[in-house]
Image (cartoon, rainbow, N blue to C red):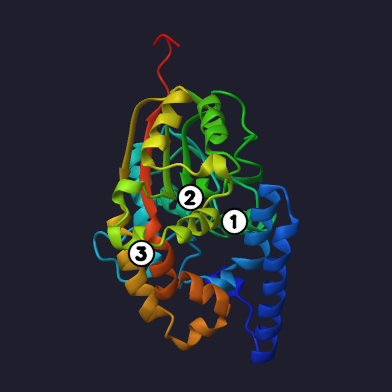
Amino acid sequence: MTVVEFRDSESSTRRILRWVREWGWFASLVFVPAIPDRFSRVYDDILTASNWLGEESLFFNLGYWKDNPRTFDQAGAALARLLATEAHLGPDDIVVDVGCGFGDQDFLWADEFGPKRITGVNISAKQVEIATARAAELGLSDIIEYTHGSASDLPQPSASATKVTALESALHFPSRSRFFDEAFRVLAPGGRLVTADVVPLANEHVSSRTSRLRPLEKLVHGIFTTSRQNHTNAEEYRQALVTAGFKDVRVYSIRNHVYPQYAEYVNLKLRQPEMRRINPLIRTFFGRRGVSFWAPWLDYIVATADKPPSGDGL
């Protein structure tokens, strides 16, 4: 199945009707109190394949642009490779990929890093269905499976994985701290958690020009974090991992290789006629104008954290 097959060919009338439905679904989110249900609806009904930027993939991340990738697909793949490299992913690994989207990073990891097993966990039933179909189409069902579940209550036995990953998904979790606890439980001793995540930028790193617009800060943080429990800057993120029991915690920023290049690319990309399929509100929010609104308040981090080996005093 190609990416195009997940995007209906639409007449202009059908496209407008879809946009109206999406606007209605977006407005209805205010009446969905449970955070997992809210984000399940976002990804089932609004941020669908028809509303995203990939041409040959269904990557739903902002990408890693350090080495000047030419396309959104390549930038998404570069971010997936960065996580796999930080995880030291290899043939003996059993991976739990939390917030797995449509599975593109899992397919790349299976092809390039050859782990023994990957289980993708997602709160979106529709994405689980599509990712499962895509894995079967690629002949990867023997090593990749997808399951519906929450990051706050992972459907895996304790000490059953060597690696846990969350590629630009933990910002949507009800509580990162709860997810860190669950990742620690699921990992075998000596296992590693790796995340790529969007978090509030620490105040000392916000430019003086931006800091004059403080009323916007809470709005942006409210959009990109699910609750006060997730209003966590990079240092607080590191402390939360330590509190969960992890050792050798490393948290570093890659925002300078994400937001500027993404904004430049998407500014050109959205001028293409094919991009008219994307909902105008989403085009605005994820386009250059939207990035200039929200990126000054946000960091983009990569975190690695190890569960101590057996006999390490825990």
In the rendered structure, which disc, 1 or 3, sits on the residue that comes first in sequence? 3
Q: Does residue 112 appear in the picture of this structure?
A: no
Q: Which residue is mark 3?
A: 74
Which residue is labeled 2 in the image?
A: 106
What's the residue at 54%, 57% (across, down)?
223
Residue 170 percent location from the top left of the image:
51, 45
- Do the residues bearing badges 3 and 2 touch, measured as CB atoms within 8 Å? no
- Spatial CA distance of label 3 from label 2 is 15 Å
Mark 3 vs 2, N-terminal side: 3
| Residue drawn at x 36%, y 70% as measured from the top left | 263
Q: Nearer the viewer, residue 293 or 168?
A: 293
Q: Of label 1 and label 2, which has the lower sequence position?
A: 2
Pointers 1 and 2 in contact (C-beta within 8 Å): yes
| Outermost residue, bottom side | 12
Q: Residues within 10 Å of mark 1 (few under 14, many from 20)?
A: many
Residue type indicated by callout 3: Gln
Q: Residue furthest front?
A: 212
Q: Quadrant of the C terminus?
A: top left
Residue 85: image location, x then y, percent: 32, 43
- Give SS at disc 3: helix
The residue lying at 61 percent from left, 43 percent from top is 174
133 vs 189: above or below = below
Question: Could you tell me the amino acid type at mark 1?
Answer: Ala
Whether residue 186 appears in this view of the structure is yes
How far is disc 1 from disc 2 in space, using C-alphas?
10 Å
Q: Is 5 on the left-hand or right-hand side of 301?
A: right
Task: Determine the secondary structure under disc 1.
Answer: helix
* Front one among 51 and 213: 213
Judging by the rendered image, the residue that carries numbered circle 1 is 131
Q: Position of residue 252 (x, y in %)?
A: 30, 42
49 horizontally vs 211: left or right: right
